[in-house]
Image: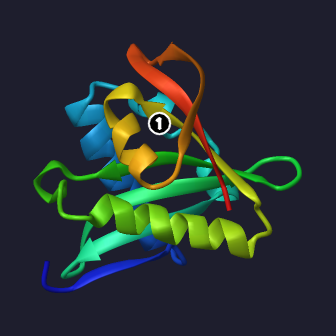
Amino acid sequence: MTNLIVKKVETSQELKDAQEVRRQVFTEEQGIKREVDINGLDQNSDHVIAYDNDIPIGTARIRYKIGIQAKLERIAVLKPYRGQGIGKRIIAASLGLAKTKGALEVILDSQQSAAGFYEKLGFRQEGAPFEEVGIPHIAMTKKL
């Protein structure tokens, strides 16, 4: 990682870059239908994007729920870049952004295979596992 930048999405090109990362991870790698991922909620959400030398490599979407809760969604890092702390940086940036918007709690629906990653970042599992798009998930929360 020579020039890793993790930032809030501010332009339409940065949003397209985030959606391209999601396409590669969710559609190509995990077989999730594109229309399930791009579900009409991007325009009214905040997004975080990670670049390595201007190449988009990771992203997350933040939606704000009623009151003081934010939901992290569409968290993705391209396969060759996993295990290098990029996901941790994306989550940290997302939590910081949610906090500036007044969120006191963040929720997410983790793929069960990634639950340990989120637990290390202070999230705790809630409720029973469930299936979404054919993949086992678990709800998780973190107080800010």
Amino acid at circle 1: Asp
Secondary element at tag 1: helix
Q: How many marks?
A: 1
Quarter of the picture holding the C terminus: bottom right
- Whether residue 14 is situated above or below residue 88 in the rendered picture: below
Instruction: Work out whether residue 102 or residue 22 is closer to the camera in this orientation and state it.
Output: 102
**Horizontal arrangement in the rendering, residue 143 relative to residue 135 (left or right):** right
**Residue at 70%, 56% in the rendered image:** 44
Q: Is residue 141 visible to us here? A: yes
Residue 2: image quadrant is: bottom left
**Residue at 22%, 52% in the rendered image:** 78
Residue 99: image quadrant is: bottom right
Picture coordinates of residue 40 (x, y %)? Answer: 62, 42
| The furthest residue to the bottom | 3
Picture coordinates of residue 58 (x, y %)? Answer: 32, 60
Quarter of the picture holding the N terminus: bottom left
Residue 102: image quadrant is: bottom right
The residue to which callout 1 is attached is 37
Instruction: Work out whether residue 128 or residue 91 is closer to the camera in this orientation and state it.
Output: 128
Q: Is residue 17 visible to us here? A: no
- Whether residue 123 is situated above or below residue 43 in the rendered picture: above
Picture coordinates of residue 25 (x, y %)? Answer: 27, 42
**Residue at 26%, 29% in the rendered image:** 30
